[in-house]
Image: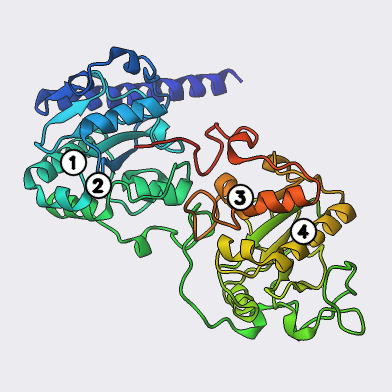
């Protein structure tokens, strides 16, 4: 035990020395890259008291590139501070550097999943203007290259999985989430140009390490429309189904889903249904929606057509669907055929069918008639709410997008439930959401 303690103590000493060395090296940029304090940009001292930065427990292993887009560096900094965020450096249009106090080692909040190991650098202006501003581009490249060299950070964007390299905020958003919106941030074009001029190794999105794996918050799927039949082990033409138990679902004379309306799918596991998630297909055709689910190897439990007829797609409602990351393990997933929320709201017959179906499912599985706390997975939720909490979709955008919160309000309240708007969702103001609830983020 004494020997093990000595080894552990030696490890702590070595680790501490490495951290201290990297802290010292981080500050060395001040020798030949002068940085003006952020206070030169805005004079309101009170706003700076909102964010002080915190000591860093881990060595810096990545640099995250942002840009201010249409905001001036002054407005960008003010909006960041007002929303609880901050970057370490801003590179002005004139190539001048601005920074947080005199110590960039402090942790500030900009990309919550990576802040503990990152420095954040923002470039003033829109993408195209920055690309034309050679002085600003050179200054940005010089800063990134210097920090990368001082901190032994690979001058490449290949592997954000390793959290070691130089990345744009948009790449970090796609991998780890914790963003306000998915606007282009940092600009891949800007990073590519900097790598070209400063001997970096740039990788396009298709070549980012592990980009097509399912653990990205914003998924990207390989374009492959041809899925061989053996990929499916359940559904239409493959397996028998149990008789339909719900009165609100269509049945043939024997009590089964009509064969053409069933779904081919890959069986994952059985579930104990305790919640319901509503989606819209974004396609105005049942058959095309069915084909799209099969092509993407996804599965919903039920689909309600535009003619107000509902069909059980899976052999059994306790077969796990694959439609909403974070909720599949115990939720009934209902797809509603319609191009957008407006089309859904205009189809009163379909809406009434969905309401009756949700109520019947809620009664059958004892599902609470509210959407307050998605963490409990006991309620009636929109795919929007699931996406904002858990991610795992190829489409993450907008505020009310799947199937639309006004639609959810109409469904839940029509069956006597209690609808909570987004601001009242449980713990919505915390960082424990893929899509943060804030006005602005660097």
* Above or below: residue 381 compared with residue 432: below
Residue tagged by mark 4?
A: 355
Q: Earlier in the sequence, mark 4 or mark 3?
A: 4
> Is the residue under label 1 in contact with that under label 4 (CB below 8 Å)?
no
Q: Which mark is residue 405?
A: 3
Camera-side mark, 4 or 2: 4
Classed neighbour count for the residue bearing mark 1: other residues with Cα under 10 Å, few (<14), some (14–19), many (≥20): many
Sequence order check, earlier mark of 4 and 1 = 1
Which residue in the rendered view is the most extreme toward the right? 254
**SS assignment at label 3:** helix
- Residue corresponding to mark 2: 155
What x and y, as percent, mark residue 76? 28, 33
Q: Position of residue 168 (x, y in %)?
A: 31, 47
Q: Is 95 situated left or right of 307 in this image?
A: left
**First reached walking from the N terminus: tag 4 or tag 2:** 2
Question: Which is closer to the viewer, label 3 or label 2?
Answer: 3
């Amino acid at each position: 035990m004494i020997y093990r303690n000595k080894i552990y103590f030696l490890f702590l000493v070595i680790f501490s020395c490495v951290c201290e060395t990297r802290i010292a090296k981080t500050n060395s940029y001040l020798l030949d890259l002068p940085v003006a304090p952020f206070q030169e940009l805005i004079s309101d001292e009170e706003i700076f008291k909102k964010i002080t930065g915190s000591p860093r427990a881990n060595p810096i292993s990545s640099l995250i590139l942002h840009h201010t887009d249409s905001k001036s560096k002054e407005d960008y900094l003010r909006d960041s501070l007002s929303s609880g965020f901050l970057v370490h450096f801003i590179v002005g249009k004139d190539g001048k550097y601005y920074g947080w106090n005199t110590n960039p080692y402090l942790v500030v909040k900009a990309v919550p999943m990576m802040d503990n190991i990152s420095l954040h650098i923002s470039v003033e202006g829109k993408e195209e203007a920055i690309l034309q501003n050679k002085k600003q581009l050179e200054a940005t490249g010089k800063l990134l290259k210097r920090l990368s060299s001082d901190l032994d950070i690979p001058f490449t964007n290949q592997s954000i999985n390793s959290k070691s390299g130089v990345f744009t905020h948009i790449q970090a958003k796609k991998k780890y989430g914790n963003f306000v919106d998915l606007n282009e941030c940092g600009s891949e074009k800007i990073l590519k140009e900097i790598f070209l001029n400063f001997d970096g190794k740039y990788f396009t999105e298709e070549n980012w390490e592990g980009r097509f794996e399912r653990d990205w918050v914003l998924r990207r799927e390989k374009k492959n429309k041809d899925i061989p039949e053996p990929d499916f082990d359940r559904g239409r033409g493959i397996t028998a189904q149990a008789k339909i138990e719900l009165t609100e679902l269509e049945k043939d004379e024997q009590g089964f889903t009509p064969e053409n309306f069933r779904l081919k799918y890959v069986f994952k596991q059985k579930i104990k249904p305790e919640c319901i998630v509503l989606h819209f297909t974004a396609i105005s055709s049942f058959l095309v929606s069915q084909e799209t689910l099969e092509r993407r190897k996804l599965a919903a439990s039920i689909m309600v057509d535009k003619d107000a007829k509902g069909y059980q797609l899976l052999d059994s409602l306790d077969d796990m669907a694959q439609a909403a990351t974070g909720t599949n393990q115990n939720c009934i997933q209902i797809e509603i055929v319609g191009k957008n929320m407006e089309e859904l709201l205009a189809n009163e017959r379909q809406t009434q069918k969905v309401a009756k179906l949700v109520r019947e499912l809620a009664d059958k599985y004892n599902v609470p008639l509210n959407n307050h706390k998605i963490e409990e997975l006991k309620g009636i939720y929109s795919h929007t709410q699931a996406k904002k909490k858990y991610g795992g979709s190829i489409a993450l955008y907008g505020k009310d997008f799947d199937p639309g919160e006004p639609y959810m309000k109409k469904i839940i309240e029509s069956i006597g439930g209690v609808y909570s708007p987004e601001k009242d969702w449980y713990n919505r103001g915390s960082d424990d959401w893929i899509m943060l609830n804030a006005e602005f983020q660097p």
